[in-house]
Image (cartoon, rainbow, N blue to C red):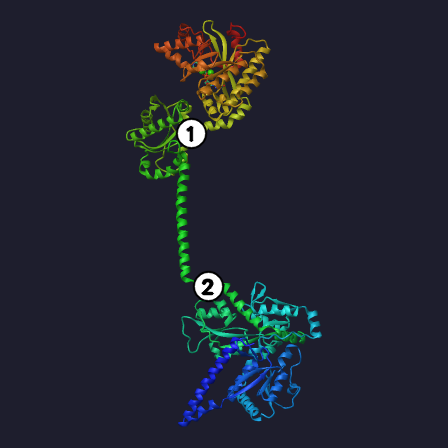
Amino acid sequence: MKTKNEKAIRTMCYAKRTVCCFLFCVLLLLTAFGAKASFACAAERMSLRVGYTSMENFLARDGEGHYSGIAYEYLEGLASYIGAELEYLPGFQQQNEERLQNGSIDMFIEPDHSFEWLMQGKPFYTDPAVLLQNTAGFQRVMLGEGVGVLCLNENAGALTDRMRSGLTEMTKINPFYRLSLEKKYYQNQTLPLMLTEEERAYLQQKKVLYAMASPGQPPYTWFDGIIHRGVVADIMRQIEKDLDIRIQVLPETDQGSMMEHLAAGDIDLVTDFFTDYNWARAHNADITFPYLSLSYVPVTRRDRTLPDHPTVACPRSHYYVRDYIEKHYLPGQLRYYNTIEDCLDAVERGKADLTMVKSITLQDYIYQNGFYNLYTSGNVLFSHQVSMAVSYQADPLLVRILNKEIAHLDQQKIKSIISREVYQSQNRETLRSLIYRNPVGTVIFLSVIFATVLLVLLFWMRMRRRHNQELYRQAHVIEDIGMYNLRWFRRELPRALAQYQEDREAGRLFLMVLSAQHISFLKEIYHAGSFRESIMNLIRKVRAENDWLLIDAMTSDLFSLIVLCRRPDGMSMKQAAAKVAHDARICVFNGTPTSVRYHIGLCAIPPKGDIHTDTWVDNAFSAHNETMANRQPVGVYDYAMQNSILRQKQMESLMEKALAKGEFKVYLQAKYNIDAQSVCAAESLVRWASPELGFLMPGQFIGLFEHNGFIVQLDYYMLEQVCQYQKNRLEHGQITVPISVNQSGMHIKEENYLERMQAIADKYHLPSGLIDLELTETAFIDFSTQDARRDASRIVTSLKKMGYRLSMDDFCTGYSSIAMLQNLPMDVMKIDRSMLLAAETSPRALTILRHVVELGHSLDMRVLVEGIETRPQELLLLGIDCHYGQGFLFAKPMPADEFSEFLEHHTTEGRILP
Ligand code: C2E
Ligand code: CA
Ligand code: CA
C-alpha cells in the first residue's frame, strides 16, 4: 500500500531529478566554456541499488521513510567515500540473492549475526565462511563485526574493488567509526545473564557479600547513618536483585581505612574502585569490568583568578590524585587533606586555589556545606571508570560472576539512576542553600517574619504591661474606696523615707494608725456604699487640711488608716494626732453630721540608723491596739508600750498552761439589798495567780484574751467553777444566792454556744436561776441589724429556758441600751458605775438615772447599780427607788471560800433569791 509519505518522497525524487537535469545542462555548458574539471565529479556520482532484509538496529525504514541501523549508517558512510548514492530495496535473503543474480540490485547486505547470537547466549561468531550457505556466484565484502557482509555479483569485479578500497580508506581515516556505531546501537542492549552451574552453586552457598563503599560523596556514594546510599548503592541493589544475593555494605567514614580492609581481605569487595589494574594489585584485589564512568571538573573560587602555579587540594587515598593530579602538578603545589569536603573547604577559605571533584557530586557539596563561593568552569579535566574490586581472598568465580552481571546491567537504567540521584540530592536542600538560591525572596520573607515578630512582641509587651498594671492594682488598691492597701504602704514606705530623708534626719517623721471608735457599729447601721463614701469624704477633707500627712493607706477590712506624717512645726506627735482627730471629729453619714472619736497609735521613725519599715509599721499598729485595749484616744509606741507588748506575749505563752493548772481563781463580790444590807447575789470575777507574772487583775489580761479568743475558754472555765461551787453548797445544804458569771461578746459569735451552755446546764443540774449570765449590750451590737436582733433575742430566750438568769451588764455605757431592752427579755439591769458618779454631781444625770431605774422596773427587771463606795451613794440610790447594789462599800471581790463565810453572816434573805 502506498502511503502519503511514499508519494511525498517520490515527488521529492522527481524534483531532485529535475534539478539534476538542470545542473547537467549547466555542466555541459560550463564544459563547453572550459570550466574546471572538478565539477565533472557530480556527474560521475553513481546510483547503487542495495537489497536488505529489514531488521531493527541493522537496517530498517520507519513509517516516515527514514532509515536507521548500524548497517545503514555504515553503508552511507562508505557511499560517501566511493561517491555513490544508495537506493535500498527490502527483501528476504532468497529474494536478494535472486535479484542480485538477475541484476535488479547491485548488491545486498547480510547481517553479521554476532550480536544477535550473543543475545541468545551463542558463542561469538568468528568464521566468515559460515556466513553464507550458498556462496556460488557472489563476492563478499566484510564490513566488520556487528555491521555485516556486503554481497555483490561475482561479475561486478570493478564495483567490488571500489567498495573494498573505499572501505580501506574510510577505516584508515576513522578506525573507530564502526566501534562508535556499535556503541550507539548495541550499548543499550542488555546481555542475558548466563551463569554456569558452578557459578550458581557458588552464589547459593555465598548468599551475602561483605563490601565497603567510598563515603561522603553524595549523590555518588555516601552513608545516611549506617545505610549506604547514592548511585553506587542503587547499582548494588540492582546487582543484588539480579544475582539474588545480599551485598552487605559496611559503613565506612574513611577512604584510606576502606582500602586497608580490602588489602587485608577483611571484605569481599569494594563497590566503587578506580578501574586501574595497578591500583587493584596494590590492594590485593581483582577488578571487574567498569560499570560506570565519572568525569572530574576543576573547582576554584568565584572571586579569584587562578594563578599560574595554583595550589591544588587533594584528598588522600583517592586514586585520581595519583593518576591525574600528581602527574600534572609539581609536588610543591599539592596540599593533602583527608576528605573531598576538606579540599573544597580549603579552596573556599583560600588555603588552596584549586581542587578537582566528580561533576555529579559538586552541587551537593556546595549546597550541603554552604560553599557558595566555589565555582566550576564545567570543563571536564579527566574521566575515569569505576569497577568493583574483589579481594584476592574471594573465590575467583566471584569476579567472573560480577563481570557477567556488569555486562548484563542495563546502561539506560544506570543513566536514570544517576539522574534520579542527582535530582534527589537537589531536593536535599539545606536552609542555607535555599536562602542562597532565593536571596530576594529570603530578604522579603525574613522582613515579614521580623515585622510579625516585632508586632507580636510589641503587642505582647503592651498586654503584659497592662496585665502587670492590673495585677499591681489588684494587689495594692482597695477596689471599693480606691485607696491603697497596707501591702502598698509597706512597699512604698522605703521610697517615701528616701524622699523625705531631711525630715527624717530632723526627727520629724512618724507613723500614725487611726481607727474610728465603734467603727463596726457605724458600719452596720449605715448602708455600705454611703458609709464608704462618707469615710472617703472625711479622709479627703483631712488630707486637704493637713499637708503634713504624706502618704496613707487603708487596711483591707476598712478598719484602720495608716499615715506617714511629718510633724508640723511647734507640735508634738501627740498634738499632731489630736489635730487629726479634731479635724475628723464630725463625719457626715447620709447627710447627718455624726460625732466620731478615734483610737490613734503613733510610732516615731528614728532619725538615724538602718531602715526597718516593717517593724515601724508593726509598732504603729501595736500602739494602736494598745490604745484600743486601754480605751485611750492616743498611744505612742515607746519603751513602756514595748514592755507591755512583751508582757502580753508572755501572757499568751502562759495562758493555756495557767488554765490547765488552775491558776485562774474565782473571786466573788456580793450584790446586796441596800435596805437590808444583806447579800442577795454575787458576781464572779476572775483573778490570775501566776507564778511567773504575779497576781493579775482582769484589766491586765481580759482585753488580750478577748483579742486572741482565749476568753471563750476562760469563761467556760469560770462558769463551770461557779456551777461546781453552787452544786457543792447545795449538796452541803448551805445557803445559796444567784452567782453571775461574765460572758464575753465572743460567745454570741460562737457556733455551738447554745449547745455548750445546754451541756453545762445538764451536767450540774442546778435549780433555775442560781446561775446568772452577765452580758453587755456590745455583745449584741454586731447583731443590730433586724436579723441579728431576732437572733439575739432567740439566744436570750434559749438561755433562759435552760435555767440561766440574765443580766444586762454595764448598762448606760453604750449607744443602744434602751433599744436593746425592748427585744431582750433580761432579768437584771446592772447600771454602770459611771452613771452613779455622774448622778452624784449632775442633777440632769440624776434625773436620767431615776428614769432608767423606773424603766427597768417597768420592764419587770431587777435594777442594780455597780460601784457603790460611799454611804451617800447608797442613800442617793434609795432616793430614786433603787434598792440593789454592788460595791466596795458593802464587799470587795474575795476568794470563793471567804465569800462562803461572808455569806453565812450577811444574808437574811431566803436560800434562793428570785
Ligand atoms: P465588770 O463586769 O463591770 O465587773 C465589776 C468590776 O467593778 C470589777 O472589777 C469589780 O472589782 C469592780 N468593782 C466592784 N465594786 C467596785 C467599786 O465600788 N468601785 C470600783 N471602782 N470598782 C468596783 P474587776 O474585777 O477588775 O473586773 C473588771 C472587768 O473584767 C469586769 O467588769 C468584767 O468586765 C471583766 N471580767 C472579770 N472577770 C471576768 C470573767 O470571768 N469573764 C469575763 N468575760 N470578764 C470578766
Ligand atoms: Ca460584770
Ligand atoms: Ca459591770
The mark tally for this picture is: 2
- Residue 607 place in picture, x, y as percent: 34, 36
**Mark 1 vs 2: CB contact within 8 A:** no
Q: Secondary structure at mark 2?
A: helix
Residue 162, by quadrant, is bottom right
Please name whichever residue, 2 or 462, is drawn nearer the observer in this view of the structure.
2
Q: Which residue is mark 2?
A: 433
Q: Residue 557, which numbered label? A: 1
Identify the residue at image location x=43%, y=68%. 373
Q: Is residue 460 visible?
A: yes
- Residue 753 place in picture, x, y as percent: 53, 21
Q: CA distance from mark 1 to mark 2?
A: 68 Å
Q: Secondary structure at mark 1?
A: loop
Where is the N terminus found, in terms of image quarters?
A: bottom right
- Residue 22 place in picture, x, y as percent: 43, 87
Mark 1 or 2: the one toward you? 2
Specify the amino acid type for callout 2. Answer: Ser
- Residue 26 place in picture, x, y as percent: 42, 89
Please name whichever residue, 541 or 358, is drawn nearer the observer in this view of the structure.
358
Residue 598, by quadrant, is top left
Identify the residue at image location x=48%, y=82%. 14
Specify the amino acid type for callout 1. Answer: Asp
Left of 654 or right of it: where is 491? left
Please name whichever residue, 188 or 739, is drawn nearer the observer in this view of the structure.
188
N-term mark: 1 or 2 = 2
Q: Estimate how packed mark 1 is, as few (under 14), some (14 to 19) or many (20 or more) residues with alpha carbons within 10 Å.
A: few
